[in-house]
Image (spheres, grey):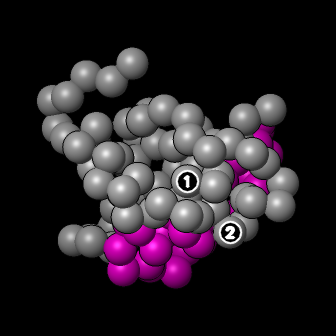
Amino acid sequence: MLPLLEIRRVGRDIYTYSVRAGRTDAGRCEDPIDSLERCLNDAGDSLGHYFPSVSVSLDGQDLGSYSVRSLQQNSVGLAAELLVKARPGRMTS
């Protein structure tokens, strides 16, 4: 089962996230996090012991599957990639 990391922008460079595994809400971070990089790293730390990969969405847009290790060890590069993929009007597959 591939969990879903749902990241929501709640302000300029401010994010929250939740994690779902199937129909179960597996975790939620309601405290605002001040960068997408830190949000990815925090989520990666919480997922790392349980899952090797995760499906990621940003503001409801599915952006693909990524290794949890990349959330933890390459959060800066992954954040940049996700922001490019999530640009308004961009089609994702």
Please rate how many residues cluster around mark 1, counting C-alpha atoms within 10 Å: few if below 14, some from 14 to 19, many from 20. Answer: some
Q: Above or below — where is 18 with respect to 91?
A: below
- Identify the residue position indicated by label 1 in the image: 70
Please tell me which of labels 2 and 1 falls first in the chain: 2
Where does the magenta region start and end? 17-43
- Say if the magenta span includes residue 5: no
Q: At which x and y percent is residue 63?
A: 42, 35
- Say if the magenta span includes residue 36: yes
Q: Amino acid at mark 1?
A: Ser
Q: Residue furthest left?
A: 89
At 83% from the left and 61% from the top, the residue drawn is 49
Q: Amino acid at mark 2?
A: Asp
Q: Above or below — where is 31 with respect to 42?
A: below
Residue 33 in which image quadrant = bottom left
**Relative horizontal placement of residue 85, taking residue 2 as reference (left or right):** left
Whether residue 20 appears in this view of the structure is yes
- Identify the residue position indicated by label 2 in the image: 45
Q: Secondary structure at mark 1?
A: helix
At 73% from the left and 59% from the top, the residue drawn is 47
At 15% from the left and 30% from the top, the residue drawn is 89
